[in-house]
Amino acid sequence: MLVYEKWIEENDELVRHLFGTMDNIPAVGDNQLIYKDGDGDVIETIPENAVFLDDGHGGINMVDTDGNVTFLGVNIKKSNNEVVNIIPGGDYTPTEKILTSIRFKHKPNKTAYIEGEEIDTTGIKIEATFASGDKEDVTADCEFTPEGALATTDEAITASYTYDDVTKTADYAITVVEKQLTGIAVKTPPTKTAYTTSETLDMTGLVLTASYDNNTTEDINYGTTGITYDPAEGTEITADTTVTITYGGKTTTQTVTFS
């Protein structure tokens, strides 16, 4: 009887099965294989297209096309009482290279981030484990997420590795804190910076540059909620004036002239 192995993923675990088919099973007779059920009774007829499966506990089950299962026992004997061991003793080494898991063997150098930064994979080493017990460094073949700017909702770097259509992932925890405003500056002055008698302050056209602690900047346009001016817009300008601009608790100035 020819029995071959196959590792099958069940409930996220790899389970070893041994298979044989009718094409490989000698007929019952002198010096041929004798099949006995779990009670020791000889099975005289092997169902057509029967399949033999490892029961997972050291025995063999015979399953017919109707799904009926018969336990055959740990060993099958020939009629001359020679024992035919179906399941080899000791450790069983799979013949297929099957990916079972991956892990962070070395953690990333950087695990604390500010919103808007991108992940840094420096220092990461990913180790893959296969059903045979072999381990490999697969770092160069992994994909890492999240991609692009990090958000405060991101909690881990995820490594993903695929071998022979089997994909495994592993996570490493990170922290992402909200970016903090560090300063503002005038990028584009307001359209009107020179005033004469009876004209009032108008900051239309102003664009600020906001700087953050993650080394990023963004434009803050006139009309954005939270920008305030001192003196306020609508105030009559009667002399050269330094306008104090406040946004997010940070300040800058813009000078307007009077003539």
Image (cartoon, rainbow, N blue to C red):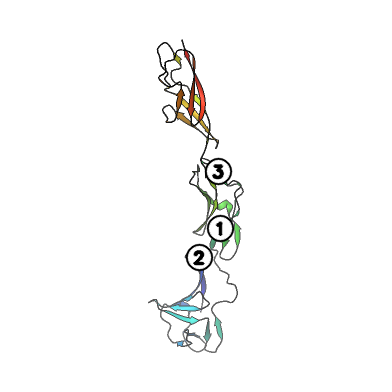
Residue farthest left in this picture: 66
Determine which residue is flagged by label 1.
102
The answer to whether one can see residue 22 in this image is no
Please give the name of the residue rendered at 58% of the width and 51% of the height, measured from the top-left corner: 140
Per the image, label 2 sits on a secondary structure element best described as strand
Please give the name of the residue rendered at 50% of the width and 31% of the height, measured from the top-left corner: 249
Q: Point out which mark residue 12 bears.
A: none
Image depth: mark 3 or mark 1 in front: 3
Determine which residue is flagged by label 3.
113
Image depth: mark 2 or mark 3 in front: 3
Q: Earlier in the sequence, mark 2 or mark 3?
A: 2
Per the image, label 1 sits on a secondary structure element best described as strand
Q: Is residue 12 above or below residue 118?
A: below
Q: Amino acid at mark 1?
A: Ile
Front residue (pair 246, 68) = 246
Front residue (pair 259, 56) = 259
**At which x and y percent is residue 130?**
56, 63
Evaluate if marks 2 and 1 touch, with contact meaning CB atoms under 8 Å apart: no
Q: Amino acid at mark 3?
A: Tyr
Front residue (pair 37, 183) = 183
Please give the name of the residue rendered at 45% of the width and 26% of the height, measured from the top-left corner: 228
Q: Is residue 230 above or below residue 105?
A: above
**At which x and y percent is residue 92?**
57, 72
Determine which residue is flagged by label 2.
13
Please give the name of the residue rendered at 56% of the width and 58% of the height, measured from the top-left corner: 102
Q: Earlier in the sequence, mark 2 or mark 1?
A: 2
**At which x and y percent is residue 146?**
50, 47
